[in-house]
Image: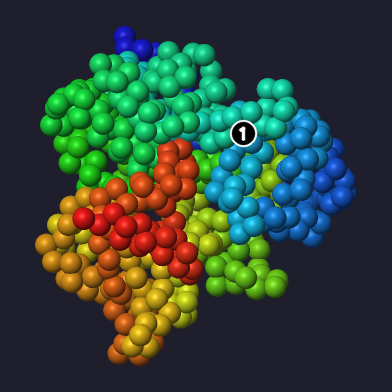
């Protein structure tokens, strides 16, 4: 009997528990809330916000305000300096470094021991449970999993306290048993220089029996390209003939899928999306035929939602899970066993089902363009690019977009800077197809484009090879969970990129 067949038995109880999501989702969520309130009442934050007297969701929503990172920042910094019982009982030793706010280069998300075990590792366990349920023929554990992570460093001068990418914290604390079925070595996985790490990972894994991949699509692709260069092979299945699945997350997979399918030509290769952020593990693609993800309901995360058409209002509507509607776009709030209370995570989602609760990620509350009332979100952008690529044979490696508020001819438009791994047969046609698809999927954009009165057709600037890589390297953001900001109302990022694009043009 294969090792996978033996290991699969461990996941059977959890597979049965996931089936209860169909009928017990709301009750699961309220059990989570009661647990979090019970634990949180013993903290300074809990005492200040009357958690000891909180008996219902309505009390909770009244007593605890909606928070951004700015509201919790001082408390988190006290936790980083070793203070106990601030936002969560006890002392928190790990802090996941995430992209910054308006006022700070980075955010530091507390990761308590409970959160690490119940949320992050619990979600990872569910990924495997769902995968094995869907693919009983899997040989997942008969080889190695290539897990791509970031790096960490000491947190101030606090003993045994670390700050870094969430993936590095997960690798640092991973079960010794898991180390038998993963590559590369821990010391390689935690290197801070991504370019050195990429080469070493490729060298270490080249002759291993790799059956599965886990990581961010953009960074994993960079590693796989290096594996191909070292191997001299045409396709990845020639290097790893038993490779069967890529567990991916962090950024949308759609722009990268053609590149992966060119690299891995086996018709048996599978792709499974996960939603594992620094703040928590929120979703898994539990059905291979459905692109939406199952919301994780019993992992120490209580969810609330703000309709995006009210986002930014002084007193927006906030609803728990039972209040969401299919098809509506929401900003997500979370309360977790890491001490995040009614925390605005910054992601936006749209539910595709409420029985069970399934959703798609539509973007970020700060990654959108609404310079002229067009309300363009990342979901629109991904649909538009996928269509334009399909119609022109193009493949997009990286991109970003921002508004041009007024040029020398008093014209306004969106400007897209795109790095193609395969250029379209006609760039003007690509731009026209993208523009048309955006109008089709976004009525506000369509209205602003009407007769070119408010917005003219979008402009595409072709980026040189490796532009986005060089920009991230310049900013010290290679590897880990760093992402290229896709859409922005500000021109800061795109202007930096355009300057770099021109400075190295041949």
Colour scheme in the image? Answer: rainbow
Q: Is 213 or 337 nearer to us in this picture? A: 213
Q: Is residue 299 left or right of residue 291?
A: right
Residue 322 falls in image quadrant: bottom right
Q: Position of residue 240 (x, y in %)?
A: 23, 23
- Residue 368 visible at all: no
Mark 1 neighbour class, 10 Å CA radius: few under 14, some 14 to 19, many 20 or more: many
What residue is drawn where x is 33% and y is 66%?
416
**Is 164 rendered above or below residue 486?**
above
Residue 70 falls in image quadrant: bottom right
Q: Secondary structure at mark 1?
A: strand
Residue 200 falls in image quadrant: top left
How many dots with numbers?
Answer: 1
Q: Is residue 40 left or right of residue 203?
A: right
Q: Is 382 or 284 nearer to us in this picture? A: 382
Q: Position of residue 69 (x, y in %)?
A: 67, 52
What residue is drawn where x is 16% and y is 32%?
235
What residue is drawn where x is 47% and y is 80%?
373
Indicate the quadrant containing the C terminus: top left, top right, bottom left or bottom right: bottom left
What residue is drawn where x is 31% and y is 9%?
1
Residue underneath mark 1: 163
- Residue 475 visible at all: yes
Q: Is residue 216 left or right of residue 150?
A: left
**Is 39 rendered above or below residue 437?**
above
């Amino acid at each position: 009997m294969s090792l996978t067949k033996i290991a699969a038995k461990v996941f059977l109880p959890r597979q049965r528990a996931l089936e209860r999501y169909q009928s017990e989702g709301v009750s699961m969520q309220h059990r989570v809330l009661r647990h979090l309130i019970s634990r949180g009442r013993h903290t300074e934050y809990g005492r200040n916000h009357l958690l000891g007297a909180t008996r219902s969701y309505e009390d909770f929503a009244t007593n605890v305000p909606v928070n951004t990172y700015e509201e919790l920042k001082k408390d988190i910094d006290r936790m980083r300096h070793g203070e106990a019982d601030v936002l969560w009982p006890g002392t928190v030793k790990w802090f996941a470094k995430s992209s910054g706010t308006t006022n700070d280069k980075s955010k530091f998300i507390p990761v308590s021991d409970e959160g690490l075990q119940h949320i992050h590792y619990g979600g990872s366990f569910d990924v495997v449970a769902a995968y094995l349920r869907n693919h009983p023929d899997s040989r997942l554990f008969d080889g190695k999993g290539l897990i791509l992570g970031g790096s960490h460093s000491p947190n101030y001068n606090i003993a045994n306290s670390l700050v870094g990418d969430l993936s590095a914290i997960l690798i640092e604390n991973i079960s010794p048993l898991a180390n038998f079925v993963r590559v590369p070595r821990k010391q390689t996985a935690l290197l801070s220089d991504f370019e050195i790490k990429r080469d070493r990972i490729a060298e270490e894994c080249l002759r291993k029996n790799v059956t599965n991949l886990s990581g961010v699509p953009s960074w994993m692709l960079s590693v796989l390209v290096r594996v191909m260069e070292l191997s001299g092979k045409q396709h990845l299945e020639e290097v790893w003939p038993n490779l069967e699945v890529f567990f991916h997350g962090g950024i949308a997979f759609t722009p990268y899928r053609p590149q992966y399918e060119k690299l891995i030509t086996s018709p048996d290769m599978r792709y499974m999306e996960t939603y594992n952020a620094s703040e928590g593990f929120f979703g898994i693609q539990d059905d291979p035929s459905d692109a939406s993800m199952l919301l994780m309901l019993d992992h120490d995360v209580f969810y609330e939602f703000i309709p995006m058409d009210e986002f930014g209002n002084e007193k927006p509507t906030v609803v728990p899970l039972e209040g969401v509607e299919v098809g509506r776009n929401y900003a997500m709030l979370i309360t977790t066993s890491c001490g995040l209370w009614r925390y605005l995570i910054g992601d936006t989602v749209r539910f595709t089902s409420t029985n069970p609760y399934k959703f798609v990620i539509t973007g970020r509350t700060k990654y959108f363009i609404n310079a002229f009332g067009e309300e363009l979100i990342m979901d629109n952008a991904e649909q538009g690019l996928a269509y334009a690529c399909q119609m022109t044979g193009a493949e997009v490696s990286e991109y970003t977009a921002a508004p041009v508020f007024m040029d020398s001819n008093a014209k306004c438009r969106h400007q897209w800077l795109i790095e193609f791994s395969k250029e379209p047969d006609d760039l003007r046609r690509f731009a026209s197809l993208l523009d048309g698809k955006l109008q089709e999927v976004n009525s506000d954009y369509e209205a602003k484009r009407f007769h070119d009165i408010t917005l003219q057709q979008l402009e595409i600037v072709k980026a040189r090879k490796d532009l986005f890589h060089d920009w991230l390297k310049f900013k010290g953001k290679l590897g880990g969970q760093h992402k290229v900001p896709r859409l922005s109302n500000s021109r800061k990022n795109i202007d930096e990129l355009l300057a770099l694009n021109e400075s190295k043009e041949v």
